[in-house]
Image (spheres, coloured by chain):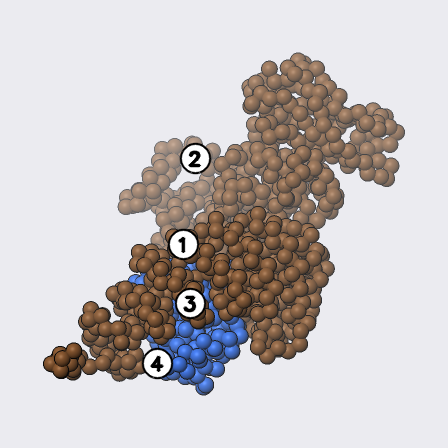
Chain colours: A blue, B brown
Amino acid sequence: MIKFVLILTKQGQTRLSHYYMPIELTERPTLEADVIRRILARAPGQCSFLDYEDYKIVYRRYLALYFIIGIDDDENEVATLELIHLIVETIDKYIPKVTDLDLMYNVEKMHMILDEMIMNGRVVETCKNKILAPIQLMDSQR
Amino acid sequence: MSVLQALEEKVSKLSKMPAPIRLKDLIRNIRAARTAADERSVVQKELAQIRDLFRDEDSVYRCRNVAKVLYIHMLGYAAHFGQLECLKLIASPRFTDKRIGYLGATLLLDERHDVHLLMTNSMKNDMNHNTQYVVGLSLSCLGSICSPEMSRDLAGEVEKLLKTSNAYIKKKAALCAVRITRKVPELMEMFIPSVRSLLNDKNHGVQLTAVCLVHEMCERSPDTLLHFRKLVPNLVRILKNLIMSGYSPEHDVSGVSDPFLQVKVLQLLRVLGRKDPDASEAMNDILAQVATNTETSKNVGNAILYETVLTIMDINSESGLRVLAVNILGRFLLNNDKNIRYVALNTLLKTVQADMNAVQRHRSTILDCLKDSDISIKKRSVELCFALINASNVRTMVKELIFFLDKADPEFKSYTSSNIFTACDRYSPNKRWHIDTMMRVLTAAGNYVPDDSVSSLIQMISETGSLQAYIVQQLYKALKDDISQQPLAQVSLWCIGEFGDMLVAGVVDEEEPIQVSEDDILDLGESLMNATSSSQVTKEYALLAMVKLSARFSPQSLERIKKIVIPYSQSMDMELQQRSVEFGALINTYNHMRAGLLERMPPMEKKDTDKVNNGELTDEQLESREISIPSTQNESKGLLDILGDGDFTAPVNNQPNKSEPMSSGGELLDLLGGLDLSAPPTVAPTIQPMGAPLNSVPNLMDGLDALQPMTTTTTATMNLMNQNTDLLGGLTNNIGAPSIPPIMAVDKDGLKVEFNFEKEGSAPHVVNITLKATNSTTNPFSSFIFQAAVPKTFQLQLMSPSGDLVPPNNSGAITQLIKVANPQNANLRMRYKFSYSTGGSTVSDQGEVNTFPANMFT
């Protein structure tokens, strides 16, 4: 089960955070700061998997952003890495040549895309067309 | 409406505040803030404005305001007041309002807040909405945050939606069902009927979520697991379609069609196939197919292969498949990608207990991984290396591990050093190598060596009489180089104290003796006492060593020793002061007793080296033992049978790699599973191990122990020193006319085994049975082994037999002592198993003895 999805910058600012586990609002910034600190401490060639408290963190860097997914023991780490890539590709399909500024200004759309892909910690849809269909429909209605 | 009223309205509208800024602009403003204080002020101003607007009940811009609240909440500011607004948005008819409302509800609310219950009604209405997207929205929200009460209310709706034909809704409803199942397990039965049709759906999204749902249900309740085992053919078919079907643009990821579904199906197959031979049978083909057909050049393929390997390892797969899996892992290990190597090491760690021989092939690659710079990989490969050590490769492995220890981080040092000690304990080929390795570890690991290893090393040194001169010389040399390492200093000081005379005499057989004078040693001792790096314990050791030397060295050194020891009687440290005063008294007043008191210590009893003390065993029972090993794996299984309870699984965890404390049961298994094969073969009547594979021995003992935690089977004691324990002492006491009639336990094919009884004088419920085995045939019986087991309420001790050859024609006998304790005064039954070889063939048999006399224990 996926515990959380985070998109953080190299400076530690949160661009997007979505938690699938009950966690106090006050603890969230602490968690994010801790995670990014450990990730920044690693060299580029090292493993993308990290052990953190009782779950595993899978991360990948795209330009200046870190896409981070926290999973527990029964998820396949390598498949989660693929999921991160799928998320990035879907966002790229929605906003062609997306940059991190685009991500920041459209954060509510990013949330919606993420909602279409992951629900309650499990993957619900992996076909990019189907994921983007409701979002694009909503945009066309505005 | 009159003109006046209309005018008033227009005026009031104009005087209202301007429209609130869009989310984009807010973000831009926040980014423009240069300092944290700046940003805080921008945010607070905006929050205040939003709060006002909410109070005004402005429905037009509510959605925009809530979006801003959500963004600000994500940055970390408290934004709880937005929760109620989200509810209002959800109730609104506009889609954009609903979207933001549900998003806000998912982010800001969870089941701990009571507010969420207010959403239930809106959600119910939305689930019956015409537009699929609205239905989808409410399902998502329900799936993310519902509480048990909400689940109960809305479960019916969800179940209805599971049956619609709309794939978009079905998949979301399935995941809702997952959450409902988790929150309220009783509702699980509602969803079971629809599962099969969900799985057969063409839409991959629906299949994916259906697999999730089945997985969750199987984990919650074992009955559903049995029920869903029937689905295995369906799942196999899905997988087959995925692999066989050509390129499908919708679900393709780098050439593999829908890897996510493949991985999830494999996961579910793992859960269904565990411990079930039929289901595993059905899966074997498809697993082999997936394993061979998936291409491994991309990460995607590796993800699928990883999942396949995990599944193969967990189910009862056939051996060919297991070999395939280990080969795949081996290929992963050679992959350049660090992630894949990490994953491979992780999985190998899980499988090494089941399948050690296969993993041994990759040992060299694993040793290479030790040198990797990545800490995750290093950690995994260290654990794996310890799991792989066995008697044949122990030298090379330990050599590599010591290199690793030299360069390791502190957190690794203590783990590695304690494990090296355990490994050496079990597998070292000879004492000399053992001692050498220990010393090397002490110098490499420095102060991180765990404390009990100091005492176990001292104990070992005291046992090996022949090497003491060599040891003390090596330790002296090492200590001279570096006095700051505490464990090394402590061990060296003890040895110098005990064997200082050997050091001065300079007689060592294998190495070049070095010239050490008494003064040199005393110099070293003094520097150690004065060094700031020495801990208090080390100083205590040093004081004691100095005093011992006073008995060993020539009288001239006595003055010097006095000068070193006495000043500490004014030391601020209580321990040192006490010691110094006592030793001073010993030297001055009680000089006549000094020599006797400070004699060389006798070899110490070996104590349990494992970390967790098993309270059940006393020290007497913790003698190093050698156990008669059956020659084949089958025989050990036979013995397991003889103990009666056939349905237990022999615990497989018998590798010396665990430094974490185990449960006491596991500790016991390890204790008896760890053979002390390194001790020199001394005492004669021991039954030689017949070249059995190492694995079979722990299994045998594990088997015995799993059933009878209190039974110990001690046979030959390896060290003469252990002879003076109560057990064997008790043996000599029991000479007397037996008051209980003897019985004939076995009488078969010329072998007669007679049991003679003697009561233990001190303990009324303990009886010594002397077993006498005679052979009436013309061929001698060689390699005669007799094993016995009793019910749980008894305690059994089997001593070493007098020999293993039963001469023919009743010309002699083998005797063996069996002690049985009966604390609960029950009737004794004994199961036995014996084997011997005669005339070139092996005979073995087992049976039960019920004919014990009733007055045995009274």
Q: In the current view of this chain or complex, which residue is farthest to the front?
A: B2
Chain under disc 4: A
Viewport quadrant of the C terminus of chain A: bottom left
Q: State the residue position of label 4.
A: A105
Looking at numbered disc 4 in the image, what kind of residue is underneath it?
Answer: Tyr
Of the pair B763 and B684, the residue shown nearer to us:
B763
| Residue B717 locus on image (x, y percent) | 63, 36
Looking at numbered disc 2 in the image, what kind of residue is underneath it?
Answer: Arg
Q: State the residue position of label 2.
A: B594
Q: State the residue position of label 1.
A: B153
Looking at numbered disc 1 in the image, what kind of residue is underneath it?
Answer: Asp
Chain under disc 3: B
Badge 2 or badge 1: first in the primary sequence: 1
Is the residue under label 4 in contact with that under label 1 (CB below 8 Å)? no
Q: Secondary structure at mark 1?
A: helix
Q: CA distance from mark 3 to mark 2?
A: 99 Å
Disc 4 versus disc 3: nearer the observer: 3
Badge 3 or badge 2: first in the primary sequence: 3
Q: CA distance from mark 1 to mark 4?
A: 38 Å
Q: CA distance from mark 4 to mark 2?
A: 87 Å
Q: Secondary structure at mark 2?
A: helix
Q: State the residue position of label 3.
A: B129
